[in-house]
Amino acid sequence: MKTIRLTAAQAMVRWLSVQQNEEGERFIEGIWAIFGHGNVAGIGEALYEHRKEFPTWRGHNEQTMAHTAIAFAKAKKRRQAMAVTTSIGPGATNLVTAAATAHVNRLPLLLIPGDVFANRAPDPVLQQIEHFGDGTVSANDTFRAVSRYFDRITRPEQIMTALPRALRVMTDPADCGPVTLAFCQDVQAEAHDYPESFFEPKVWRIRRPEPDAVELAEAVALLKAAKSPVIVAGGGVVYSGAEAALADFAAMHDIPVVETQAGKSALDHDHALNFGPVGVTGASSANIVCESADLVIGLGTRFQDFTTGSWALFKNPLRRMLSINVQAYDAAKHGAASLVSDAKIALEALDRELGSHRFDAPDARLRADWFEATAAVKAAPDAAGNALPTDAQVIGAVQRSSGRDTVVMGAAGTMPGELHKIWDAPQGGYHMEYGNSCMGYEIAGAIGIKMARPDADVVCMVGDGSYMMANSELATAVMMGIPFTVVLTDNRGFGCINRLQQGTGGAPFNNLLDDAMHVNPSAIDFVAHAGSMGAKAVKASDIKSLEAELEAAKGSDRPVVIVIDTDPAPSTKAGGHWWDVAVPEVSTRAEVKTARKSYETNIAKQRLAT
Ligand SMILES: Cc1ncc(C[n+]2csc(CCOP(=O)(O)OP(=O)(O)O)c2C)c(N)n1
Ligand SMILES: [Mg+2]
């Protein structure tokens, strides 16, 4: 057996650089790195050695570097991913939130935090937590809950089993998610005679599981017995590449499709059977169809509470559920008949079985009414009055300046709900991280989307709260010459949570900056802040000037941040659905007592686990 003597870190990087997808691209495009004593000497030296075949990028925060990697993988529809390496201790645990985000969203992400010395010679090293009762625990054990595969590399040989397991998980359509390989500092630097065959290039094909014959027969029987089915399209449609199959299937059989946050833009917004966004942030067209549907067909969806209206949305007493999902865990949810399958394969199989069967066409007027309602809230405000713009009006301006190449993106705050409701997305033009809805994903995420889709025009919609939580990768985007447009809505605080607080009977407290304990009123100059990092930054005084700035931002060689003051109070009233947020059972506040009464009426409408 021919061998080559390498350090464990050199072997890992060399191996990662030759793992490919079916398109012949590196599956792991490259690695984000912030070095410390836990990875600079071992992994750092190996990355330098391989910097031509396997690029290394430097960010400003471990969590946000991983956000970029997550957005890249999502924009690549899971066909490529990125790695992130950190030092031990705080550098490592800074990644835990991002691991959770990748875990919730089922997105591939390779995390390689450094770990304490396997030989324990210098214990305790700087940043070692020292668990008193368990010698095998390090800070990296915090990743176990949020990794689909976790391993600790304590001997150089272990990478020969750990790395293939890591790629297996990331390229498995059902198990896909984050992998954590905690890499002991001394082991990174230790040499071993690796078989040369270990470094042969390998292609990782993402399989398309076929439906089980009995499950398929059951699904067909359910469909044939139905009169008014609805398809709830989730992110699985996109990861399967089933967009065209879904467009054809819906049109051929007259089945309305409604879209979740992850599923939005699977169908073009003007497809005649696209009845719009579903659930809490849904369209009236979508929700009316869902309320009366006698068969709810989940297609690549996790049935998150925003989608199901906390299980109070699908309320036809005769309603049955069919869940088509590559992951059996999702397919079995809520008593659904399971069809464990790739979405595209399942649609093709169902189409063959249904032949020319058409269901009763849904009422097209519902769609028309919805488009009319959303056009009205997106319209520019009248010149009269000087009230601050709403988020919907900001969205209207962005919509008017956008084209088919625009990808609008976001994660938390008012924007995800408003965009889900009222953004008219061309197919593939919507990117929302709404599994974890992680504040601080936005700017880093925009970088990842632009790296995945250089031809796209990326518009990042971010509130002042999320911007303040994580903005430093703006400097990375400037440095790397990655342009996108940031629309920063400054409503002086956590507007959406302030509304939720009052909706549950609470007093406005600790959400808007003026309602938080302060000695000096907060006054953040966002233009100066973004400008100081090298971004182009401007303030738009109103919707008209926002439109002008959006035009001016086009073709920029660096990120452009457009700040606009908005009103924290309004949100789009049309559409929507109740959402289960637990209201206190006893309180001294009359408003809470009233909210509790209506809460009790609403929870009685939930249809649980049937
Ligand atoms: C990391 C993280 N912390 C807390 C939350 C809860 N949360 C959701 S939205 C929000 C406020 C967002 O404020 P901003 O970005 O300004 O949006 P706005 O609603 O004001 O437009 C908070 C605190 C979250 N989603 N993520
Ligand atoms: Mg805000």
Image: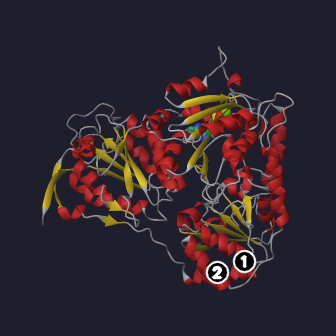
Can residue 347 be seen from the camera position used here?
A: yes
Position of the N terminus, as image quadrant, is bottom left
- Quadrant position of residue 439: top right
Q: Position of residue 564 (x, y in %)?
A: 68, 31
Task: Check disc 2 and give the amino acid type.
Answer: Asp
Which residue is more in the foreground, 600 or 279? Answer: 279
Which residue is more in the foreground, 234 or 159? Answer: 234
- Quadrant position of residue 572: top right
Q: Residue at x 45, y 71 (%)?
A: 207
Q: Which residue is mark 1?
A: 253
Which of disc 1 and disc 2 is earlier in sequence?
1
| Colour theme | secondary structure
Determine the CA span between mark 2 and mark 1.
8 Å
Q: Which residue is mark 2?
A: 351
- Quadrant position of residue 481: top left
Q: Secondary structure at mark 2?
A: helix
Task: Check disc 1 and give the amino acid type.
Answer: His
Mark 2 closeness class: few <14, some 14–19, many ≥20 residues within 10 Å: some
Q: Residue at x 25, y 56 (%)?
A: 158
User: Are the residues at dot 2 and dot 1 in contact (C-beta closer than 8 Å)?
Assistant: yes
Which residue is more in the foreground, 528 or 502? Answer: 528
The residue sitting at the right extreme is 384
Which residue is more in the foreground, 26 or 132? Answer: 26
Can residue 584 be seen from the camera position used here?
A: no
Q: Residue at x 57, y 72 (%)?
A: 344
Position of the C terminus, as image quadrant, is bottom right
Tell me: is circle 2 under 8 Å from ligand 1: no
Residue 463 placement, left or right of 212: right
